[in-house]
Image: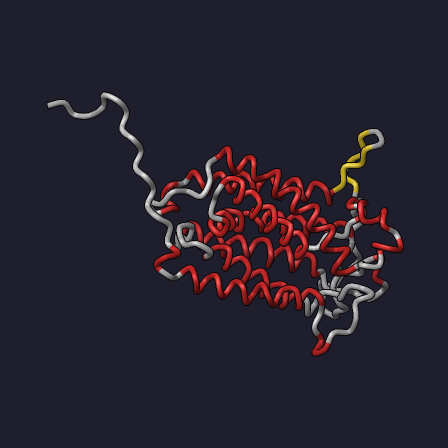
């Protein structure tokens, strides 16, 4: 199957090129922001406990998270996959529009951003992470679709009928691994976390949703690395491991630990403080 003729640029406005890759980040951040506000406002999800953050705090948090995604994603890509650019072409580090963002680096960046914000506003960092985690699949879904449009991060050769011949990957049909990742890391992970927030009502359980995210993202990534073409210039790791697998296994272990920890009685958030009665509203005898 030939690769569809996608233009990575949606539209040109004068000298400015609006790229699908940039829109994926914008769309993911905006939808994640609104989903976080929805979760915080829906009191039934918190089972009588105090929501982690209010609307204005979530609005402020978005700036921190955005910086964490961009800076962490780009620096992670350079350090994990292209460290030679630091001394051979340092200006390329700044050219995010050329592609080259690491999810694991972006995740570290978001963790730093959330921890910084929690420290400034004196919020519980794990509970804040539980509010952020269900929002991440939006960005993952759009990011993988943008990878497909860009014709990058293709899969290994395949004989399956839906194999695609990517222009920059030779003449062999390959797995459209970007679409597999959009489905597993985006849609399915979102549904798992939706079950966690709305059905199991895990928001009051400190670390539970963060743990679910880490566990199932890590498992998905390890599984998909078997059909995704390993990044070039990577050393040959033993046992067929890839860099993506090695970065994801600690996520799986951390996710399991957080889920187990969230089952402790001490992990349940305290009840919400009752609203103070308005002056003069009491019953007069």
Picture mark count: 0
Tell me the residue at 77%/49% (across/down): 99
Q: Along the horizontal axis of the image, is 275 left or right of 18? A: left
In the rendered image, the quadrant that contains the C terminus is top left
Residue 23: horizontal and vertical position, in percent?
70, 40
185 or 84, which is in the foreground? 84
Quadrant for residue 230, please give it.
bottom right
Residue 181: horizontal and vertical position, in percent?
65, 58
Tell me the residue at 66%/42% (across/down): 67
Q: Is residue 2 above or below residue 36?
A: below
In the rendered image, the quadrant that contains the N terminus is bottom right
Q: Is residue 36 above or below residue 141?
A: above
Tell me the residue at 76%/41% (across/down): 19
- Residue that extends furthest to the bottom in the rendered view of this protein: 239
Residue 90: horizontal and vertical position, in percent?
85, 50
Q: Along the horizontal axis of the image, is 5 left or right of 114? A: right
């Amino acid at each position: 199957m030939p690769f569809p003729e996608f233009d990575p640029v949606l539209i040109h406005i004068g000298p400015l090129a609006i790229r699908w890759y940039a829109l994926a980040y914008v769309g993911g951040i905006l939808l994640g922001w609104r989903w976080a506000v929805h979760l915080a406002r829906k009191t039934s999800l918190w089972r009588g406990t105090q929501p982690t953050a209010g609307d204005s705090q979530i609005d402020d948090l978005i700036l921190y998270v955005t910086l964490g995604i961009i800076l962490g994603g780009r620096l992670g890509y350079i350090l994990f996959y292209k460290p030679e650019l630091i001394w051979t072409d340092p200006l390329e580090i700044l050219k995010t529009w050329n592609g080259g963002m690491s999810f694991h680096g972006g995740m570290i960046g978001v963790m730093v951003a959330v921890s910084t914000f929690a420290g400034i506003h004196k919020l519980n960092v794990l509970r804040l992470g539980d509010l952020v985690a269900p929002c991440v699949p939006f960005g993952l879904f759009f990011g993988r679709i943008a990878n497909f449009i860009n014709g990058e991060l293709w899969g290994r050769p395949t004989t399956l009928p839906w194999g695609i011949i990517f222009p920059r990957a030779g003449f062999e049909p390959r797995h459209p691994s970007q679409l597999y990742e959009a489905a597993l890391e985006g849609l399915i992970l979102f549904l798992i976390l939706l079950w966690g927030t709305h059905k199991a009502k895990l928001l009051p359980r400190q670390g539970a949703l963060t743990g679910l995210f880490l566990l199932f993202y890590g498992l998905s990534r390890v599984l998909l690395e078997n059909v995704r073409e390993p990044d070039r210039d990577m050393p040959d790791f033993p046992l067929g491991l890839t860099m993506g697998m090695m970065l994801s296994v600690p996520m799986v272990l951390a996710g399991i630990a957080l889920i187990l920890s969230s089952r402790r009685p001490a992990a349940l958030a305290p009840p919400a403080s009752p609203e103070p009665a308005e002056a003069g509203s009491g019953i007069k005898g």
